[in-house]
Amino acid sequence: MSMIQVQEARQKILEKINFKGVEKVSLDQALGRVLAEDIVAGLNNPPLDNSAMDGYALIAEDIANATPDTPVKLEVVEEIAAGYSAKGTLKSGQAMRIMTGAPIPAGANAVLMQEDTDKEDNFILAKDRADVEENIRKAGEDVKKGETVIKKGASLSPAHIGMMAVVGRSQVAVGQRPTVSILSTGDEILELDQKPEGPQIYNSNGHMLAAQIRSAGGIPIYLGIAKDTEKDLMEKFE
């Protein structure tokens, strides 16, 4: 049996490989799989303008001249936790206590972090100014509706899994895992539970290749060991 070059052998193998198709898997089973569709965001993230930190939602113009020596006094009229919206509209001279991630109330255009305030009963003393939109994360700042967040063909990593969760995907289309047969050859090769004699060695390459196939997302099929004869090789292939 004549020998062929590595590139020729590789080409012959690739010509015999067929794409197995696509299957849907749950997000928790998608790690390491090859994505078979573009992942497109169906909503903005964040969905609404929200606070980037704990502090007070207010009107930036109200505290334009605030300093530690000349603080501006504002009435605290409401408190907004993450996951909830303000009940009222903010007016000049007012502030609303706001937590990180909470939606910006109507009427407010900035958030002053709590470290720049002093509390005084139902009022705060703003000791610093704030620019318009300061400490506000805009709707869609991380992901915009209609944006392709992961492209088809990506090998899915933990970061990809997290992004698909961000856009609400519980299932995803991936390529079916390829099966790869492994046949070790050589009169000197033994299975791991056999006792070597003289020049005989264990079948280390077969197990290493199986591990590499698994790490690449494939399913290894172990065909055993073939002796160095054409007859034994053909029997194993059949």
Image: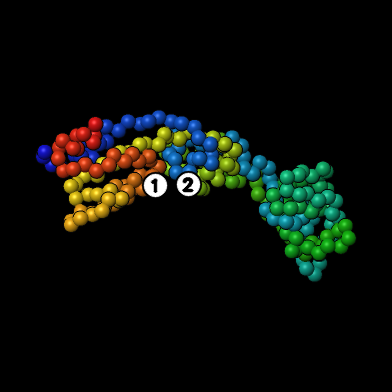
Residue located beneath label 2 in the image: 157
Q: Residues within 10 Å of mark 1 (few under 14, many from 20)?
A: few
Given contact means CB atoms under 8 Å apart, are the residues at marks 2 and 1 in contact?
A: no
What is the three-letter code of the residue carrying label 1? Ser
| Residue 85 on image: x %, y % | 77, 43
Residue at (67, 53) in percent of width and height: 52
Residue 147 as seen in the image, left or right of residue 7: right
Q: Quadrant of residue 229?
A: top left
Who is closer to the viewer here, 181 or 70? Answer: 181
Outermost residue to the bottom: 69
Q: Compared to 8, does 108 lie above or below? A: below
Residue at (21, 34) in percent of width and height: 235
Distance from Cα at disc 2 to Cα at disc 1: 13 Å
| Residue 147 on image: x %, y % | 54, 38
What is the three-letter code of the residue carrying label 2? Ser
Q: Compared to 113, does 142 lie above or below? A: above
Residue 11 as seen in the image, left or right of residue 221: left
Outermost residue to the left: 2
Residue at (80, 70) in percent of width and height: 69
Residue 137 as seen in the image, left or right of residue 213: right
Q: Secondary structure at mark 2?
A: loop
Query: Is residue 142 shown to the viewer in this render?
Result: yes
Screen quadrant of the N terminus: top left
Q: Nearer the viewer, mark 2 or mark 1?
A: 1
Residue at (16, 43) in percent of width and height: 228
Query: What label sits on residue 215 in the rendered view?
Result: 1
Who is closer to the viewer here, 140 or 42? Answer: 42
Screen quadrant of the C terminus: top left
Query: Is residue 66 shown to the viewer in this render?
Result: no
**Looking at the image, is mark 2 or mark 1 earlier in the sequence?**
2
Q: Quadrant of residue 177?
A: top left
